[in-house]
Structure formats: C-alpha cells, structure tokens
Image: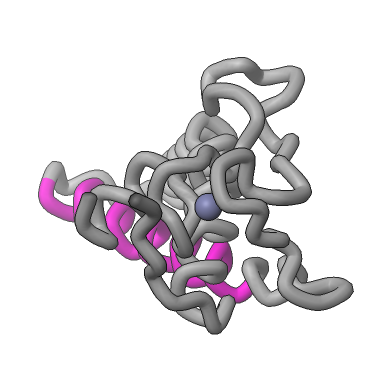
C-alpha cells in the first residue's frame, strides 16, 4: 500500500497495515479513540508525550481551507451575507469534525512522526 492510500485509510505509517484508530470515524461516541500501539507492528503512535498537540496546527490549516472554500463557494453564488457565511463555516466544521480530528493526527504522524516504512513479510 502506498503512503497516500495508507494515510487515507488511517493505517500505521511504519507497517501500513495496522489501524491507528480503534473504530470508524462515523461512530461518533468513539471516533477519537486511538490505539496506543499499532496492532500489527507495535509502533507507539504518540511519539513523545504531548506529540499530538502539534496536530492542532494541521487542524487549523484544514479549518482555514474550509473557511476559504466556503467564502469562494458563496461568492460564486453571489451570496455576501455574514450570517450565512459564519453558519456555513461552523456547520461544515462541526459536520466534518471526526474527519478533521482524525486526518490532522494522521497527517501530523506521517509528516512529523519520524517513522520510516518497514514492510512486514
Ligand atoms: Zn504498524
């Protein structure tokens, strides 16, 4: 599995087989729960104490991208109403919260985890 597909499917960056998260993003009560170690290769996902605090910056970038995209989409439809803009942004971010949370952690782990791909045989 390539690194992009592995990251998209939430797989461990080291073996690209084990799941990073315990359940699906659609299970709203536990979408945030991560495995401590990779179930396949044993990699510790939290690389150092507080490692995932850095994922907030990735989440911030995602949120800015959503704000810009909503702004562009509304201007395409000639809607220049502040309330519509704010409600659209807040609604979209709340709707996408499980995915934003998970993909910001996954992306941060892949980019800054210092983990090399080690295929298992
Ligand atoms: Zn693994």
Lateral position of residue 102 relative to residue 53, left or right? left
* Closest to the observer, 85 or 51: 51
Q: In the rendered view, would you say 34 is above or below 28?
A: below
* Closest to the observer, 109 or 17: 17
Q: Magenta stretch: dominant SS?
A: helix
Confirm whether the magenta stretch covers residue 77.
no
- Figure disc tally: 0
Where residue 28 sits: x, y (%)? Answer: 66, 19
Where residue 6 sits: x, y (%)? Answer: 33, 50
Q: Is residue 47 visible?
A: yes
Lateral position of residue 64 relative to residue 98, left or right? left
**Furthest-right residue in view?**
49
Where residue 77 sits: x, y (%)? Answer: 14, 42
Residue drawn 53% across the image and 59% down it: 104
Residue drawn 71% across the image and 41% down it: 35
Residue drawn 33% across the image and 64% down it: 68
**Furthest-left residue in view?**
76
Question: Which stretch is magenta?
Answer: 57-76
């Amino acid at each position: 599995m390539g690194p992009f597909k592995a990251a998209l499917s939430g797989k461990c960056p080291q073996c690209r087989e084990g799941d990073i998260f315990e359940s699906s993003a659609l299970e709203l009560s536990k979408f945030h729960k991560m495995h401590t170690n990779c179930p396949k290769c044993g990699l510790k996902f939290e690389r150092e104490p507080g490692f995932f605090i850095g994922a907030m910056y990735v989440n911030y970038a995602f949120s800015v991208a959503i704000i810009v995209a909503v702004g562009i989409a509304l201007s395409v439809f000639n809607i220049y109403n502040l309330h519509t803009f704010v409600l659209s942004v807040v609604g979209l971010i709340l709707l996408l919260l499980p995915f934003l949370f998970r993909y910001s952690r996954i992306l941060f782990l892949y980019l800054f985890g210092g983990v090399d791909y080690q295929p298992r045989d």
